[in-house]
Amino acid sequence: MNILQIGTIDNRGGAAIVSWELRNKLMALGHTVNMFVGIKYSQEKNVFQIPRKKYQDYLVKIFANDLIFAKTDYILKTPEFKNADIIHCHNLHSNFFNLNTLSKISKIKPVVWTQHDLWAFTGGCTDELKCKNPKPRKFLLFLWDNTNYLLRKKNAIYKKSKLNIVVPSVWLKRKIEKSILKDQNISLIYNGIDNSIFKKYEKNKTRQELNLPLNKKIILFIAKGGKKNILKGWQYIEKIISYYKNNKNILFVCIGEENNQQGEHLGGNNIKYINYIKDKKILAKYFSSADLFLYPSLADVFGLVAAESLSCGTPIVAFKTGGIPEIVIHKKNGYIAEYQNTDDLINGIEYIFKLNDDEINKMSENSIQRVKENFTLDIMINNYLKLYKKILNQTSN
């Protein structure tokens, strides 16, 4: 099978990691996969960066319109497009792709479009937090808000398109079924993680390897950008660190800082800051070394990092938001706290810390099993291949 992927970035960031893992696995199975992306970080020859005009970003800002200024119709003339059996789109925002091209593509080739956020069916916001307080998109920088126009424009494009929409959570599926994409084919395929890498390592051994104490309860927090990543709930982490600041038996390990800032005033010796980790095996060892993963995300379509934690046998305390409750089953492999409720996050931490060894082992087993049955890379790949074949069979009949 010959697949052409289109997305914002090739191999960095949550959505890109999903598409990159999909690409690599499909190629390992003998399929051909080419990519067109807005930003290319890899050195792969079959990944092509879409040219960007110098004036493009200025036009988007001036006219408050990120849908039409990119020049992407040329993709239809490339051999990678002409030879493709399936066109698989991922994120199409960030002003690298002309959405009118999507309609033209769908009239020639079958299109699968995986939704990693809310952009496709909103006026431009990508997550629930931003959608609740949308930033006006001012035409000519100070005139009217162009948000409603952008939504109408998207709707007009979709009405001329035939798309196979994929969502990574039931939560998002329900939203799309009520949106301007509701008339398209919609399928649920959960994102998958590599559970041959994200697996349970022996706790004391990994703590020694990572220079972490053996005699403390470790609470792990991960967010790219660390404290700056408000969407991942750092403000709640601050409150919880403050709550436990006099508890010498607890250590907070916060991964994702741009600069290592160990021993900052917040928490003092109670907190350890670690730079963002790219090596998945090392990240898996941090998960395995922790007693729980604290994930107070304020908006999540799926929650890839949550699946990674569970795959390492580490229970999660998280807010009830987006697709998280589909990954974390309350009091089975973690604790689901009421949204934006710090006290309930603390209740979750205390609940897990009070479990005896047998109960903790059972919760760890539940976590690993939950991933094995629903969220592995192999399951995701197989489900996409089934969808590809189903679409191609329908096209040929």
Image (tube, rainbow, N blue to C red):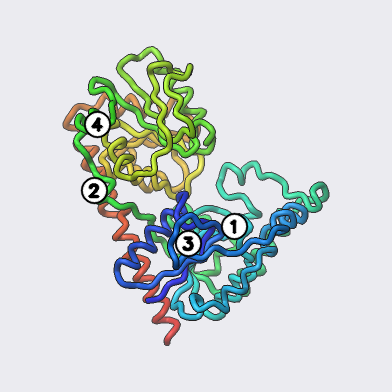
Say what amino acid the circle numbered 4 marks. Answer: Glu
Q: Where does the image place residue 173, in percent across and percent down from the top left?
A: 47, 58
Mark nearer the N terminus (3 vs 4): 3
| Helix, strand or loop status at disc 3 | strand
Crowding at label 3, few (<14), some or many (≥20) Cα neighbours within 10 Å?
A: many
Q: Which of the two discs, 2 and 1, sits closer to the camera?
A: 1
Q: Residue at x 55, y 53 (%)?
A: 118
Q: Amino acid at mark 2?
A: Gln
Circle 1 residue = 93
Task: Give yes or no for contact between labels 2 and 1 (Cβ–Cβ under 8 Å).
Answer: no
Name the residue type under label 3: Thr
Amino acid identity at mark 1? His
- Residue 201 appears in which quarter of the rendering? top left
Q: CA distance from mark 3 to mark 1?
A: 13 Å
Q: Which residue is at the front of the view, 312 or 120?
A: 312
Q: Give me the disc on residue 369.
A: 2
Picture coordinates of residue 132 (x, y %)?
62, 43
Residue 178 visible in the snapshot: no
Vertical placement of 57 versus 161: above or below? above
Element type at mark 4: helix
Q: CA distance from mark 3 to mark 2?
A: 26 Å
Residue 209: which disc? 4
Q: Which marked residue is nearer to the observer: mark 3 or mark 4?
A: 4
User: Which is more toward the observer, 173 or 211?
Assistant: 211
| Residue farthest left in this picture | 358
Left or right: residue 99 versus residue 376 is right
SS for dot 2: helix
Q: Which of disc 1 and disc 4 is earlier in sequence? A: 1
Cα gap from disc 2 to disc 4, whole angstroms:
26 Å
